[in-house]
Image: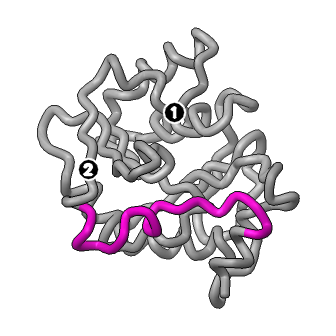
Amino acid sequence: MAAGGASRRMGRDKALLPWGASTLLGHAVARLRDAVGEVVILGGAAARYEGHGAPALADLHPGQGPLGGLLTALAALGGREAVLLLGVDVPFATVPVLRQLVEAAHAGDDVVVPLTAEGPQPLCALYRATCLEPVRRSLERGDRRMTAFWAELSVRRLGREELLPQGDPELLFRNLNTPEEYAAHRA
């Protein structure tokens, strides 16, 4: 799970904002645990979220944004075949939609990503171990975009029709980036 962002637009640490009976971080940990079992928190430059319900990892290469966090997650796979990345600021992605991302991966798919009207949602996607070296090469080139390495791999995009049984994709993958967005959706 990605929780290591700077939260510049929010003005404070998004991960620790109240959400329901918990925080955005706690809500994400619970959903991921229900969907896939094992959860690791990607904490950015420092493992700053120790004690928040799952082990926390500091980025292997701090300052590289979400792609650096993905590299850290892929490097820590320890024999597992894939990681399911979930941004802490994506609170509406339900357990069934997270499971759908895992189950939608066919043999040969390196990335499974939901596609909304705004485009692919790479902060709520499945990444196989085969992504490790392409991610590393993207970072070495200085290209930190979450989609920078996709041309080297097989990317399965789940479109609106596939996602609709789980709910409105525009809501499921909505990010909360500003205090106004947070206030509007917390109610």
Identify the element where label 1 is drawn: loop
Q: Position of residue 28 (x, y in %)?
A: 54, 69
Q: Position of residue 72 (x, y in %)?
A: 56, 36
Q: Quadrant of the N terminus?
A: bottom right
Residue 36, can we see it?
A: no
Query: Do the numbered discs 1 and 2 sit on residues whose CB atoms are within 8 Å?
Result: no
Type of amino acid under label 2: Leu
Q: Residue at x 26, y 51 (%)?
A: 159
Q: Count residues near mark 2 (Cα–Cα under 10 Å), then give few for <14, some for 14-19, many for 20+.
A: some
Q: Earlier in the sequence, mark 1 or mark 2?
A: 1
Residue 5, can we see it?
A: yes
Q: Position of residue 37 (x, y in %)?
A: 38, 67
Task: Pick out the residue farthest to the top.
Answer: 141
Type of amino acid under label 1: Met
Task: Pick out the residue farthest to the right.
Answer: 11
Q: Which residues are magenta?
A: 163-180
Marks 1/2: CA–CA distance = 17 Å
Q: Which residue is mark 2?
A: 158
Q: Which residue is mark 1?
A: 146
Q: How many marks?
A: 2
